[in-house]
Image (cartoon, rainbow, N blue to C red):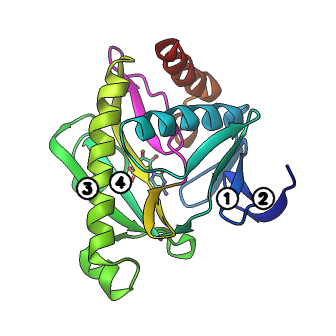
Amino acid sequence: MEKKFLYEGKAKIVYATENPDEVVVYYKDAATAFDGKKKGEIENKGYLNAQISAYIFKYLEKQGIKTHFLELVGEREQRVKRLSIIPVEVVVRNIAAGSLSKRLGLPEGTDLPFPVVELYYKNDELGDPMINHYHVQALNLATPEEIKYMEDTALKVNSLLKEFFDSLNILLVDFKLEFGRFKKEILLGDEISPDTCRFWDKDTREKLDKDRFRRDLGGVTEAYAEILKRIKEKAE
Ligand code: C5P
């Protein structure tokens, strides 16, 4: 397959293909945190996240969620539909952690009474500030219908993935989704992986996600590999 470099992000490289409606996404080992202020490498992360993300997209598609995912190509690449990304990140939280704990003073690990949805403006220069529906309209980032679809879909994804990961003895603490426009549709895009979700072991509450990198806890690759191992065991 002929590939032409399109652009490089913090964790992925995107290539154009012969089909103008499709791109190939290469998952890198590079890792960043705190708006790119912390930089590093997580050995084998590209492979692990490409595989984990592919499993999750396939699972969601089977459950009726429309995603950009088409197929895994080799170990670290995915062929996906070419989206025009909507610059609004949708975060869903089941348990307080990270920026929510900091902002609201809720101790990490506090169960939330219902899933909490948050919106962030995807803008590196501004450090992805949190926004609300008014800001989305004022900045003309998406229509009210689009935002409603994104929030409803994010809550559906939360129900599906909470149950799925529960069956792997993993708590889905929170996660971030990105959506994009494709022809007349809105599709779930980007990736769903330990880079974009918080996963805790249900028995030990051990962190199995990027917080191990953010907080220098060690065992980062091992944690990502554990997620892939449990998914694969379930798929077999
Ligand atoms: O940092 P915060 O607690 O707001 O993150 C909430 C969730 O969203 C976490 O699972 C985190 O990994 C994810 N996230 C992300 N990309 C960002 C911000 C947060 O994947 N730019």
In what element is the residue under mark 1?
A: strand
| CA distance for labels 4 and 1 | 26 Å
Residue 86 position in % (x across, y down):
47, 70
Instruction: Name the quadrant containing residue 4.
Output: bottom right
In what element is the residue under mark 4?
A: strand
Q: Which residue is labeled 1 in the image?
A: 22
Name, please, the residue furthest toward the left: 113
**Mark 4 touching mark 1, by CB under 8 A?**
no
In what element is the residue under mark 2?
A: loop
Front position among marks 3 and 4:
3
Disc with the residue nearer the chain's start (3 vs 1): 1
Does 191 lie within the magenta span? yes
Q: Amino acid at mark 4?
A: Val
**Measuring 67% from the left and 58% from the top, which residue is drawn there?**
22
Residue 146 position in % (x across, y down):
33, 70
Q: Which residue is labeled 4 in the image?
A: 91
Residue 113 in view, yes or no: yes
| CA distance for labels 3 and 4 | 12 Å
| CA distance for labels 2 and 4 | 31 Å
| CA distance for labels 2 and 3 | 32 Å
In the image, the segment drawn in magenta is: 190-209
Tell me the tag on residue 162: none
Q: CB of residue at label 4: within 8 Å of ligand 1?
A: yes
Disc with the residue nearer the chain's start (2 vs 3): 2
Q: Is residue 106 left or right of residue 227?
A: left
